[in-house]
Amino acid sequence: MTSYFHYDLHSLRLFIVVAELGSLTRAADRTSLTLSAVSKRIADLERSTGCTLLLRQPRGVELTAAGKGLLAHARQVVERVNRMANEMSDYAVGVRGHVRMWANTSAIVQFLPRDVRVFLADNPSVKISLEERLSGDIVAAVSNGDADIGIFADNVPAPNIDKAVYRQDRLVLLVPNAHPLASHEEVAFVDTLDYEYVGLNEGSSLLARLLDAAFSAERTLKVRIQVSSFDGICRMIEQGLGIGVLPEAAVRTEILAAGLRPVRLIDDWADRTLWIGTRSRDALSPEAARLFDFMSAQTQA
């Protein structure tokens, strides 16, 4: 029976390097080890797993199915060990609590910078690790314990999660000043669907909201370009490559100065709720519970 005690952390790190470089020789150069030392560690891993992890090819190595599986686990193990080391270092210098929070782009662009600043001013011994992720990934991370707290959009299912309203925002249409819709004070989403859109990448809750609205209208959303940020949307619209929808608070003064105009959407779904959630409010550490309560009290801020 294979024992987990045979999985050496240094060997796992080395295996990751080999997998990423696709070469034992280049991995040896990267890690300042001899080629024989690298080969021995990989052989030890294969002996521990009872599986062939690499296929030796004329120009390098290729991962087997078992090797790909080990790579995924190895990355998780190394990431968790690094996280543990960082948290222990924080405790050593006086940090009393570490909270892992994931949030979607809308929350980070509009609200979180101010809210985190205010919270940390009153709680200087707490460290917040904040990551920007898609709403669906955030819900999954909260459910499996990878994140203590998550902030996500209201159109993403979140079963078995304790959640509260964090903020409410409004979506607006953003168009160039010379666009035919720029003369409107407000517009129905269905009346924008003759034009090409700049949208966020697949998986974003905002893109899903637009696609659902177009489907309900029995129309097609013409997505010409997809980008990963609101800033990217604005830059593409500025160059006349389409129109877009984004949160009203994300339309900053410099965006308007670049020749863009927000137009109010009259559709009910343009008013959104951002949720804050955790797997169990009662199971949170005292520091995470304070952050959760503080954030959930910001609805009227």
Image (cartoon, helix red, strand yellow):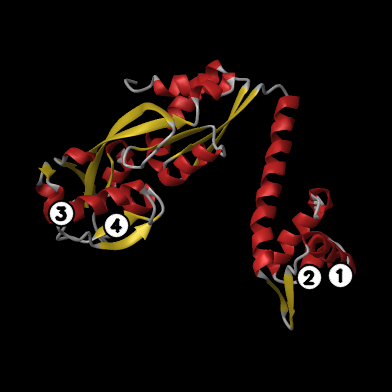
| Residue 174 visible in the picture | yes
Q: Residues within 10 Å of mark 2 (few under 14, many from 20)?
A: many
**Residue 183 got which mark?**
none
SS at mark 1?
helix
Q: Earlier in the sequence, mark 2 or mark 4?
A: 2
Q: Amino acid at mark 3?
A: Thr
Q: Amino acid at mark 2?
A: Leu
Circle 1 residue: 35
Circle 2 residue: 24
Marks 1 and 2 in Cβ contact (< 8 Å): yes
Apparent side of residue 216 relative to residue 39 in the rendered image (left or right): left
| Residue 111 visible in the picture | no
Q: 52 or 194: which is nearer to us?
A: 52
Q: Residues within 10 Å of mark 4 (few under 14, many from 20)?
A: many
Between the C-alphas of marks 1 and 2, the distance is 7 Å
Q: 51 or 77: which is nearer to us?
A: 51
Q: Earlier in the sequence, mark 3 or mark 2?
A: 2
